[in-house]
Image (spheres, helix red, strand yellow):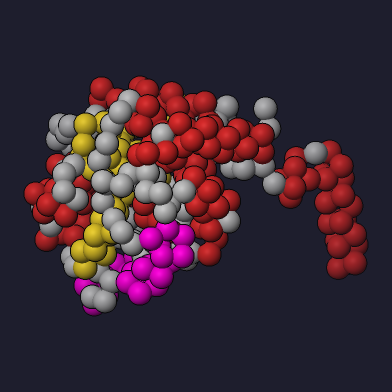
Amino acid sequence: MSAGFQARTHIHRINQYFRKTPSCYNPRVSNGSLNAYLKHGHHLVKGWLQPGAAHAIVLLSQQQRSANLSGGAAEIGVHHGKLLILLYLLGAKAEPAVAIDLFSHQHLNVDRSGAGNLDRFKRNLRRHADLDRLVIHEGDSTLLTAEHLLSLGRGPFRLFSIDGGHTAEITAHDLSTAEGALAEGGIVILDDCFNEAWPGVSDGVHHYFSQPRTIVPFAIGEGKTFFSQPAFVQRYAAVLKKMDAKAVEHDFLGNSVVCFNFKPWTLSGWIRKVDAGRMIRRAYHDLLSRLSN
């Protein structure tokens, strides 16, 4: 099955799911808004979100809904809202979306990882959804506790993204507060754990999980590492295995995790793979080599 067909199939399944439960969702944030953002809208927002990661999050949210799980969404390190807008579009009317970022306090951004802009974020969210369920916390995430987060979200969180400070200390702290505020079956989505430009994130993860925790990793892919409670990880991993036929399993932090690399099929990708494309590229490079001699 081609990746392009897989992508279309995932969007169709998402459409079918939202048509089944329209009363759960903000009527002003329609199924069409989610599809539009997945297909085109996210390109208009500055930030970091691979298509495969976006599809994985949508499918995991769908799995949560099928199990009647609920809870708000949150992100530490919003930047201009690229991922939080997606989390917002996946939320129900009674589920707040909490945006946590330094925003105007960039002098506290010790490692210069991102540069949140509150005005741009709100403008982007308004363009693709609305601000009805938005809760903003402007400040240092390391001063927050799980109790603070539960208060901001009016309860535990179903989806929680961590993309704030990339030092080991900040990563470990943000994991702690997210874990403490997570709903049953909730998912923590950590950015850049395996990004060679930010070794502090990996260092913080290993330090934090050197002690027993209530969450464990279950998947790695497209720049994201996913965690949840042990009772839920097998069903979540199974969802992501179906998304990418080439997904493999490896051990990480003493747990089996699905490693996926799902990318929508493109014309340029097809050309690079077929024999005709290789022949054309070989002839092109041979010609350049002769001209340079």
Q: Where does the image place residue 258, in percent across and percent down from the top left?
A: 43, 29
Residue 263 pos. (x, y %): 59, 42
- The residue lying at 21 percent from left, 56 percent from top is 170
Left or right of 274 in this view: 192:
left
- Residue 168 visible to an observer of this rendering: no
The one nearer the camera, 69 or 251, is 69
What quarter of the picture does the C terminus occupy?
bottom right
Residue located at (83% from left, 45% from top): 277
Horizontally, residue 138 falls left or right of residue 220, namely: left
Residue positioned 41% across, 34% down in the render: 21
Q: Which region of the structure is painted magenta?
A: 106-130
Between 66 and 185, the one lying in front of the other is: 66
Task: Name the quadrant containing residue 232.
Answer: top left
Question: At which x and y percent is residue 201?
Answer: 30, 51
Q: Is residue 54 visible?
A: yes
108 with respect to 75 (left or right): left
Q: Is residue 157 above or below residue 5?
A: below
Q: Does residue 159 sit above or below 1 in this rendering? A: below
Q: Is 116 one of the magenta-colored residues?
A: yes
The residue depicted at 78 percent of the width and 45 percent of the height is: 271
Q: Position of residue 102 (x, y in %)?
A: 25, 69
Position of the N terminus by quadrant: top right
Eyeballing the image, is 238 above or below 77? Answer: above
The front one of 55 and 256 is: 55
Is residue 20 shown in magenta? Answer: no
Numbered circles on residues, count: 0
Side of 84 relative to 203 (left or right): right
